[in-house]
Amino acid sequence: MTDTGIGAAVRRKEDHRFLTGRGTYTDDINRPGQTYAHILRSPHAHARIKSIDVSAAAKASGVVAVFTGADMAADGVGGLPCGWQIHSKDGSPMAEPAHPPLVTDKVCHVGDQVAVIIAESRTQAKDAAEKINVDYEELPAVIDMTAAIKDGSPLTHDDVAANICYDWHLGEKEPVDEGFAKAKHVAKIDIVNNRLIANAIEPRVAIGDYDPSSGEYTLYTTSQNPHVIRLLMGAFVLQIPEHKLRVVAPDVGGGFGSKIYHYAEEAILTWAAGKVKRPIKWTAERSESFISDCHGRDHVTHAELALDGDGKFLALRVSTLANMGAYLSTFAPCIPTYLHGTLLAGVYTTPAIYVEVKAVFTNTVPVDAYRGAGRPEASYLLERLVDRAAREMGLDPADIRRKNFIPADAFPYQTPVALQYDSGDYTATFDAAIKIADVDGFAARKAAAGKAGKLRGLGYSTYVEACGIAPSAVAGALGARAGLYESAEVRVHPTGSVTVFTGSHSHGQGHETTFAQLVSDSLGIPFENVDVVHGDTGKVQFGMGTYGSRSLAVGGEAIMKALGKVIDKATKIAAHVLETSEADIEFKDGQFTVAGTDKSMAFGDVALTAYVPHNFPHETLEPGLDESAFYDPANFTFPAGCHICEVEVDPETGVVEVIDFTAVDDVGRVINPMIVEGQVQGGVAQGIGQALLEECVYDESGQLVTGSYMDYTMPRASNLPNITVANETTLCAHNSLGVKGCGEVGAIGSPPAVINAVVDALSDFGVTDIAMPATPEKVWRAIQSAQAAG
Amino acid sequence: MPTVSMKVNGVDVSGDVEARTLLVQFLRETLDMTGTHVGCDTSQCGACCVLMNGDSVKSCSVLAVQAEGAEITTIEGLANGDELHPMQDAFRQNHGLQCGFCTPGMVISAIDLVSKNPKPTEKEVREWLEGNLCRCTGYHNIVKAIQAGAQAMGG
């Protein structure tokens, strides 16, 4: 290993610009002659628009134009498309209501877009919005999912019966019924996976620009996948061909899923820029982000686990309601199905599993992927259920897990819910975590805490994740309306430095560093001689973006494939110059050497020969050294691990303090351990946030109660512990690097570890359940009612 | 429109602003100094922190006219040429940043902390960061970076 190659904790290339204020985030970009947009949004959760009068606003100071949905419809602008189609049990396709960028007839959630005001300044646009008169006829709203599917409930969309988007299932019922018939114990749980808001610290921004001389549109946007935005917006919404539409997603200040999707504002700004022939910028205010960024999670689940007398799992039955919000966001339908139902085997040998999921429309902001996306919901219900089963049967929560792990020699392992895991060693991550967390010393720590009047609890969670959704053919068969490969170009310059163009997008993950390490390692050239370009459809050939922890496992592999092509061609060039056969060339540490001789040529000399091809095999090769590749994986990758949380509860106040958190993850080969550790810590922080602090709350009328940082409890430094991270590695069996993915493991593994620890701490009072977030009030009330019940 | 004058990173600047213009708008929009960021509208996130006469302030909560005559230091004013300020370098060495959006506010806030408390404990750092939100790092490495930065600054 070199000090900048694979496995080295290289300090990040991107940090200098971020630390000196030289990053270029979308709101830092200003175009000549730029105007500013303000979006007028619905104050109602559900209302018919009887009329919109924009005449006074259009005449207001500084206003350039005001547009409504009628203007967009008149131009033939389409609705926002959904990228994944699910079919119900009966074979019927999901309900897919129209999703107009600007609403014309009926608003379906607070924050729905009604009009856009374009003015010379932000304040003029905002001031003019006050002059728009919208005559609303308020309609009854439906917010709660269980109420939404009852007969007679108000309908979010008139043509969607009972508000049900789809009624999906996976697995075979009969073997599950048989498992339950022979069970010695059945553990049951009713569980809510709380609705969350991603809250990247950079709010969303869009700048639409139109060049009348070329007819080209440019959209600058805070996106995790610019090429997909170009495809969706160009082909389905605005009907602009790809060569006339450039999408740039420059430095992006965090995403966590919320910036994957094609949002209305992107289409509105791009379209409107063509109308007013001037650039237009829209910057979300934070309170606007709360009611317009997609939310995450929001599942209500009943689950039952059948066990034999020894605690071996026989069968699992799961029934989930998943909130879609008011419209289908880009990937929403696949989250509770193929990223949730398929994960219900977890790390266990449960032989029979049946899951059904009803997706429900409500008058709330659309719900889509948030860090983990479906997989945290699966691991939370499984790990809570396993803990409950252990308690009810008087088994140790560690023993019951160990007893049911898929053994390390059982891979590839076919689960009863479609996935085939390629590699893993769940006992190894479990044992390592138990050791690091000093589980042996817990009893003594609990006793000491007890003397100080505190309740100590320890919680386990073991999980498996599926990353890098693939291959495309399988994803397509499951309803994906896109391919799920990645592309890369490795451009070697004449003097041997390299620019990599990747279809992955970095919004904090450090791709510029990790990907440069791959190149430096493969070509044996200095790390400093490699730059990575991403986030611009005008520069990168194509891309499927970054989400689902896919960047290294899919994007990195595409780079490796292109590097392979570069090395192949360079080898041929070197063989020609060194007057030997290709088979006699060895490539190592940046040198092409004739085997067994001291004749060699440096990579940079080969590059120069490729571009100054005086002595070059022209009859078999073209000049230049610039290769691209598309990589479509053979399977998902399956990171897995064990998280252990230790908490202290103050019984007088209900305050939970996380004392220690240990995460031992198998993310496959680690390219940059510093970055991996940071990714896991960040994910764990979001998971602890979900478990203890965060909850998106609507009132009955559909008003968002938690609509600002004053009300939505973001984790702060003082809420969190130090997070101990370690890796136990098994290599992915189907990619060249052996990598699996690390971006989401923290958020997937941690919530059940925290809540299992809280329940453990409260178990002496007889408390068996606590809902997320375990706020002081909830914990205090649980203690009070348990004591009252005696 | 009132004219406002101040010293930003050692340079005298002035501009005509609406009375309601915030200091952060003056920096970002009038001076085109986009290193200072805006992450919320309730003065909670701290991405907009700058030093005003040596103390960190949330520049979204200060009117430009309130900064009349003040000395302002932004993230752009910390490095000495190519040489990072010790706190900036500590963030880099300790991976105290990921997406970089909250980072300017974090670094400014950290420098203010160390000026008031040269050897902050972990608990003191965590409590000081009450007004700075980060969604990427889980704060672990930010806390580490600030303690390392404090040491490098001579604490």
Image (spheres, rainbow, N blue to C red):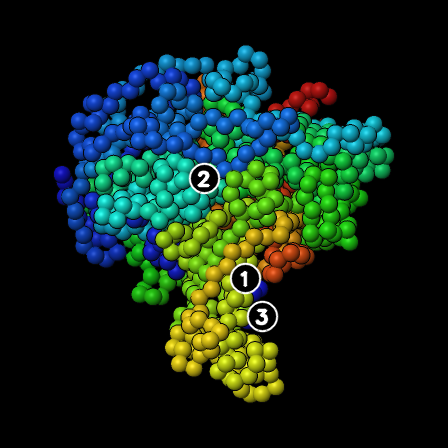
Question: What percent of the width, then of the height, locates residue A19?
Answer: 38, 56
Where A168 falls versus B78 (above or below)? above
Tell me, for residue A261, which label it has, or none: 2
Disc marking residue A1: 3
What residue is drawn where x is 52% and y is 70%? A567
Badge 1 element: helix
Marks 2 and 3 sit apart, C-alpha to C-alpha, by: 39 Å
- Chain letter of the residue carrying label 3: A
Which element type, helix, strand or loop, lies under badge 3? loop
Residue at 33% in and 56% down? A22
Q: Are marks 1 and 2 on the same chain?
A: yes
Q: How far apart are marks 1 and 2 (CA)?
A: 28 Å
Q: Report the residue that reaches farthest toward the top.
A: A152
First in sequence: mark 1 vs mark 3:
3
Amino acid at dot 2: Tyr
Q: Is residue A189 visible?
A: yes
Cβ atoms under marks 1 and 3 closer than 8 Å: no
- Answer with left or right where residue A94 lies relative to residue A452: left
Residue at x 18%, y 52% (from the top left corner): B13
The residue identified by callout 1 is: A561
Q: Position of residue A474 (x, y in %)?
A: 61, 44
- Chain letter for the residue marked with disc 2 in the picture: A
Question: Which residue ends up furthest to the front in the rendered image?
Answer: A619
Give the structural element (helix, strand or loop) at label 2.
loop
Q: Nearer the viewer, mark 2 or mark 3?
A: 2
